[in-house]
Image (cartoon, rainbow, N blue to C red):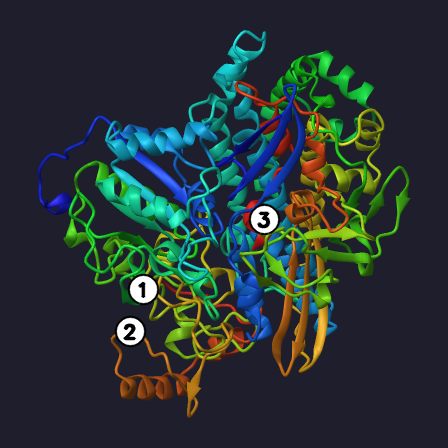
């Protein structure tokens, strides 16, 4: 499958059937999906052939009607094209899975997920809980939470490291806490068009179209970053990397290119990137609002940047910081605005 | 007598299983089960107190800001910190955007689709209701989802993103708003107002907020087409929804939207008359939950799973106020705050499917118009975030109102770390199990007498009338 990488015609199926299960999560990825900027989300999915068999927040069917849909998928009466799983899989207590029994059937949710993943053409982990375990696996992980095919950054999880869906792909990890609505819709659309293959996944099986970017890309605090003009407290305008825990220069996602809710992002809201698309982000080993340092240098350096360069560049840029940038960095609004030149710009 | 288990319950946000004992076609007894345990209260122990701001919103994707607000308030309480006025207003705006959006989402996506069901074919309103409200495919969904998205885009400006923002801080918000953003927010609120007035009410927000009795509501609905609220009222009359899901008659609200002094919505308890709320009288009973321990005030609460407990049938604790279950939510909030329509509705039938839904929509009208005033009070250039110090040892409580009711966080700090963190959510109150006296929770009581059995969706109306959020319930 060359997908969208070469000219040719998409193999659009007349119906691409989608089943959505909520496992041990908060429902936030579903809520995020509903913030899609599509003119009509359901219509937009339908326009590329995607039909929702059942979604827990949206569908009419309840109780026994839902169980019948599950059974139809398992028997092959209904060909399941995509199984979307939101939330971590709970194996505890003591391997029983009873921390999350599926309402109505009493069977551990993890059992339903295993069975349905076995018949689905594609299986998608929606959000970092389903991908890696995420927030549900934080602390001592009392519920023995894991992702579909990962446990933090270790391959395995509920389905096992070598598991492949019937369509030949591993679990597609649409990571994020929550994930961006477009990450879901664009992955599903590419799958429905037969235009998504192994080459479209990164080394952690995340769709590359968002994972090949860093959160740093497009960050509006870039000028502060360049000069290492850093924020010291919440609401300061400066760069959040040096003191306030921002991992945007290391985290894989396009949050500051694509933007959230029509124009926001964590950093644009004054909050550090906590690298929520990365496995294990929930246990960074330091408070989320503080940057861990060694001898005054942040331990987590920008991706692909040798430490010596960073130290040299930081020292140089700090010494060259314009007054405007230095003063604004520790204010909550611009106290010095960029000078307006009287002549044409060269 | 037959016993039926209803689940999975969709359009309730999370996992719910209701067990019913049915006699002569009606519910004789009900048990509300929350089958998912994630352990946030255990996860938070030992963490840096500020980490609560990261974990709390992730308890719930639909009450995310409410959870942030409760955490930020508990931290501020422990710090002895007053938020900057701009920060207080901005947080209120973010909180109100979520609460109003949740009411809107509940009505259109979670509640109304049940009237499109084939079981109602033949009712005079069914064809129109099916065309408009059918789940996924109805005309309303395609119309309201972009409006909801546009409204929630206020979160990009107020809090960076929704759900799960780290911008809400004990001292305010992590980002100051500029004058141009005040204009943007005001315009955005006006745009959503126009949508709501056109589609939901067929009237101005102020006219809806001014309805002062059940009779005034009926008169108003009869005057001319009143949008989707009008459609609901016609259905409610035909199905006598005011006689379905009768509540326990005790309403509680923590109060919401702090102002310079007091709150925009006053807290308290209503059981026929208004009383002050004594937060010290809150206790969580765990007699029927798969948990170890005894009945405790949440400040001293413990959460220890015990999945083999014979008396257990849910992971949900049973919160009680002075030993009694309480109904919480928009109806409770408006009754406690003294809205004449809400008070009149419960005088003529208590909490029921109709009064709960009407109160939710009434609250959209009340809050949305107020938000326009709040935006105008912002003073760009003045601080948006007060700074404070966390104590090495200390405690704090954060009590707020989520869309679906009263939400409290209780925090204890020892050695600069979280020694205890307890969360009592709205649906923990409403869908609580029996307590050690054997007293059922509010939903369990409201379901008694509800027609049940094949082809009857009354139970679904009762359950959804509470706007349950199950992921919050157990957390």
Judging by the rendered image, the residue that carries numbered circle 3 is B314
Disc nearest the viewer among 3 and 1: 3
Quarter of the image where one finds residue B170? bottom right
The answer to whether marks 2 and 1 mark residues whose Cβ atoms lie closer than 8 Å is: yes
Answer yes or no: are tags 2 and 3 on the same subunit. no
Left or right for B218, reference A308: right
Quarter of the image where one finds residue B305? bottom right
- Label 1 secondary element: loop
Q: Is residue B141 above or below residue A174?
A: above
- Label 2 secondary element: loop
Q: CA distance from mark 3 to mark 1?
A: 42 Å
Residue at mark 3: chain: B
Left or right for B75, reference B113: right
Judging by the rendered image, the residue that carries numbered circle 1 is A214
Residue at mark 1: chain: A
Residue B309 image point, x, y percent: 58, 55
Residue located at (51% from left, 43% from top) = B15
Left or right for A31, reference B56: left
Quarter of the image where one finds residue A248? bottom left
Q: Nearer the viewer, residue B39 or B185?
A: B39
Judging by the rendered image, the residue that carries numbered circle 2 is A303
Q: CA distance from mark 2 to mark 3?
A: 46 Å
Residue A157 image point, x, y percent: 31, 60
Residue B452 image point, x, y percent: 60, 23
Residue A338 image point, x, y percent: 47, 68
Q: Nearer the viewer, residue A122 or A329?
A: A122
């Amino acid at each position: 499958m060359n997908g969208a990488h070469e000219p040719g015609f998409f193999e659009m199926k007349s119906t691409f059937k989608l089943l959505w299960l909520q496992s041990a999560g908060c429902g936030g990825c579903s809520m995020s999906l509903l913030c899609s900027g599509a003119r009509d989300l359901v219509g937009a999915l339908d326009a590329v052939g995607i039909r929702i068999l059942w979604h827990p927040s949206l569908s009419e069917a309840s109780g026994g009607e839902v169980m019948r849909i599950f059974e139809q998928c398992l028997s092959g009466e209904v060909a399941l094209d995509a199984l979307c799983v939101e939330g971590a899989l709970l194996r505890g207590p003591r391997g029983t899975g009873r921390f999350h029994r599926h309402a109505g059937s009493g069977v551990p949710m993890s059992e339903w997920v295993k069975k349905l993943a076995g018949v689905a053409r594609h299986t998608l982990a929606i959000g970092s809980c389903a991908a890696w375990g995420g927030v549900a696996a934080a602390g001592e992980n009392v519920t023995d939470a894991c992702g579909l095919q990962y446990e933090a950054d270790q391959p395995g999880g509920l389905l096992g490291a070598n598991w492949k869906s019937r369509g030949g792909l591993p679990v597609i990890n649409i990571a994020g806490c929550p994930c961006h609505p477009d990450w879901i819709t664009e992955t599903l659309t590419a799958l429905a068009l037969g235009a998504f293959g192994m080459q479209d996944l990164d080394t952690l099986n995340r769709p590359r179209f968002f994972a090949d970017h860093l959160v740093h890309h497009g960050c509006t605090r870039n000028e502060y970053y360049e000069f290492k003009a850093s924020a010291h407290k919440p609401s300061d305008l400066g760069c959040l990397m040096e003191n306030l825990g921002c991992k945007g220069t290391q985290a894989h996602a396009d949050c500051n290119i694509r933007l959230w809710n029509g124009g926001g992002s964590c950093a644009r809201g004054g909050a550090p990137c906590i690298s929520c698309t990365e496995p294990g982000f929930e246990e960074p080993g330091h408070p989320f609002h503080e940057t861990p340092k060694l001898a005054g240098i942040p331990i987590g350096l920008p991706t692909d940047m040798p430490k010596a360069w960073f130290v040299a560049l930081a020292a140089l840029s700090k010494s060259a910081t314009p007054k405007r940038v230095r003063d604004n960095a520790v204010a909550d609004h611009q106290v010095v605005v960029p000078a307006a030149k009287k002549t044409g710009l060269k | 007598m037959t016993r039926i288990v209803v689940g999975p319950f969709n359009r309730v946000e999370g996992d719910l299983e209701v067990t019913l004992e049915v006699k002569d076609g009606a519910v004789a007894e009900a048990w509300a089960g929350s089958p998912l345990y994630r352990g946030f209260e255990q996860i938070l122990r030992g963490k840096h107190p500020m980490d609560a701001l990261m974990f709390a919103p992730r308890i719930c994707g639909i009450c995310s800001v409410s959870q942030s607000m409760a955490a930020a308030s508990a931290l501020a309480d422990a710090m002895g910190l007053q938020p900057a006025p701009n920060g207080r207003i901005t947080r209120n705006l973010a909180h109100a955007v979520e609460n109003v959006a949740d009411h809107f989402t509940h009505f259109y996506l979670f509640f109304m689709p049940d009237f499109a069901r084939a079981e109602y074919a033949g009712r005079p309103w069914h064809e129109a209701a099916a065309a408009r409200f059918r789940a996924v495919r109805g005309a309303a969904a395609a119309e309201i989802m972009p409006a909801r998205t546009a409204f929630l885009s206020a979160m990009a400006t107020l809090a960076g993103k929704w759900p799960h923002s780290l911008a809400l801080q004990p001292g305010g918000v992590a980002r100051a708003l500029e004058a141009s953003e005040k204009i943007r927010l005001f315009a955005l609120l006006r745009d959503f107002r126009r949508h709501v007035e056109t589609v939901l009410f067929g009237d101005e927000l102020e006219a809806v907020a001014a309805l002062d009795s059940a009779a005034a509501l009926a008169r108003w609905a009869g005057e001319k087409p009143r949008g989707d609220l009008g459609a609901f009222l016609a259905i409610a009359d035909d199905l006598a929804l005011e006689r379905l899901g009768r509540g326990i008659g005790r309403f509680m609200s923590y109060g919401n939207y702090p102002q310079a002094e007091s709150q925009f919505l006053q807290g308290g308890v209503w059981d026929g008359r208004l009383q002050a709320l004594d937060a010290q009288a809150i206790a969580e009973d765990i007699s029927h939950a798969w948990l170890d321990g005894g009945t405790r005030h949440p400040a001293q609460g413990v959460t220890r799973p015990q999945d083999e407990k014979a008396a257990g049938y849910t992971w949900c604790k049973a919160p009680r106020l002075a030993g009694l279950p309480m109904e919480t939510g928009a109806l409770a909030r408006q009754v406690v705050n003294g809205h004449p329509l809400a008070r009149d509705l419960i005088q003529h039938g208590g909490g029921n499917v109709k009064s709960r839904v009407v109160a939710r929509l009434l609250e959209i009208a009340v809050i949305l118009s107020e938000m326009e005033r709040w935006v105008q009070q912002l003073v760009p250039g003045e601080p948006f975030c007060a700074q404070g110090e966390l104590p090495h040892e200390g405690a704090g409580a954060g009590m707020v109102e989520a869309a679906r009711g009263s939400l409290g966080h209780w925090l204890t700090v020892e050695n600069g770390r979280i020694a205890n963190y307890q969360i009592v959510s709205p649906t923990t109150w409403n869908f609580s199990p029996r307590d050690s006296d054997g007293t059922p929770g509010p939903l369990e009581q409201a379901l008694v007498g509800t027609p049940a059995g094949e082809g009857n969706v009354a139970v679904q109306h009762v359950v959804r009338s509470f706007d349950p959020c199950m992921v919050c319930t157990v957390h």
